[in-house]
Image: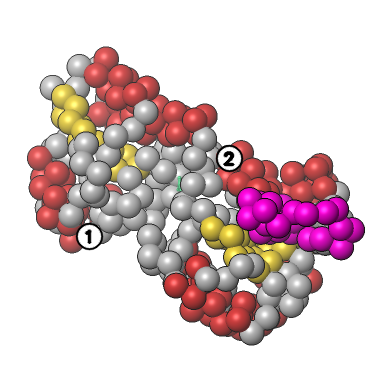
Amino acid sequence: MPSVYITNPIPEIGVNLLLKKGYKVEINKSSRDLTVEGLKKIVGDYDAVLSFLTNKIDAGVIDFASKHLKVIANFAVGFDNIDARAANARGIAVCNTPGVASESVAEHTFAMILALNKMITQQDRFVRDGKYKKWDPNLFLSHQVWGQTIGIIGLGRIGTFVGQIANGGFRMKILYFDIRRAEDFELLTDAQFAPVHKILKDSDIVSLHVPLTEQTKHLIGKEELRLMKNSAILINTARGPIVDEEALVWAIKKKEIAGAGLDVYEHEPEISKELLGMENVIFSPHTASATFETRNEMSRIAAQNIIDVLEGKEPFGLVKV
Ligand code: GLV
């Protein structure tokens, strides 16, 4: 009977799928993430591991995999926490849950865009603090988002949804960059394909939607932030290390840009203290995909990926590197 280790509790839909197959399922119920030593033991003992993005499964951990381990199924769209090449080299499939988070993350991106533009957190605090004494036409004045230019860097599923909301909801002008042009998207949204430096220069909002790879690490550093308009904001709901956090602190302090909306951090869960002290930065704790709809689908697909690999079928979320 195949054995599956789940590194953190997940919605029951996925667990039930595995149990229905008669697999032996063990779930780590501790509130702490597994240590490297813990991960090494697990890859040595089980046929399948269902992992979280906080489990760093690098080549050093994969070295400890037993010959029984067939699949590591990440409960995430991103899979930068797993050395998929090292895993594949030992015949271990790596899987993710593609597509499930696109709507949620696109909505979260817009929640941040709107909250920053309309200073929602400051307004909320103002009212709670009893400072609302009288209507004032100059109170919390902001520019409308309608008609602004959004620059989308990375036009995968999430970037595409962000573009559709921007166009359909706010009639925004869209600039985008991806490794491929997307003519259908251009037709649908009037978006213009542009190099990254032009996007940075011309956008009021720059939103990042690329995966984290060696090429995208620190894609946004001092030089890039310097190119942005002083009035522009940066949104990162992708992966923290895509932005050089120290450079971001510098850019906001120097008023090179007007603010940022961050769901992810370079040294997650650590966040620069200076950043935390900034009024024009809005934070969320890596929750852009945190909707019931998405989490249930992640659970179902991660479990189904495991079942498919163990049954010798190609899983929906097979990572190809
Ligand atoms: C969340 O960040 C994910 O990759 O699913």
Residue 156 lies, in percent from the top left, at 60, 49
Vertically, is 299 above or below 282?
A: above
Q: Does residue 33 belong to the magenta stretch? A: no
Near-viewer residue (1 or 116) = 116
Q: Secondary structure at mark 2?
A: helix
Residue 35 lies, in percent from the top left, at 18, 54
Earlier-in-chain disc, 1 versus 2: 1
Would you name the residue on which mark 2 appears? Answer: 104
For the N terminus, the quadrant is: top left
Near-viewer residue (161 or 127) = 127
Residue 52 lies, in percent from the top left, at 33, 45
Q: Secondary structure at mark 1?
A: helix
The reply to whether the residue tagged 1 has its Cβ within 8 angstroms of ligand 1 is: no
- Residue 75 sits in which quadrant? top left
Q: Residue at x 25, y 54 (%)?
A: 57
User: Magenta part of the protein: which range?
Assistant: 113-140
Q: Residue at x 24, y 19 (%)?
A: 19
Amino acid found under the numbered disc labelled 2: Ser
Residue 163 visible, this angle = yes
Near-viewer residue (1 or 143) = 143
Circle count = 2
Q: Residue at x 32, y 20 (%)?
A: 17
Q: Residue at x 10, y 40 (%)?
A: 45
Give how far apart the Cα atoms at labels 1 and 2 are: 32 Å
Q: Which mark is residue 59?
A: 1
Near-viewer residue (229 or 156) = 229
Q: Which mark is residue 107?
A: none
Quick check: 139 left or right of 78? Answer: right
Quick check: 263 left or right of 29? Answer: right
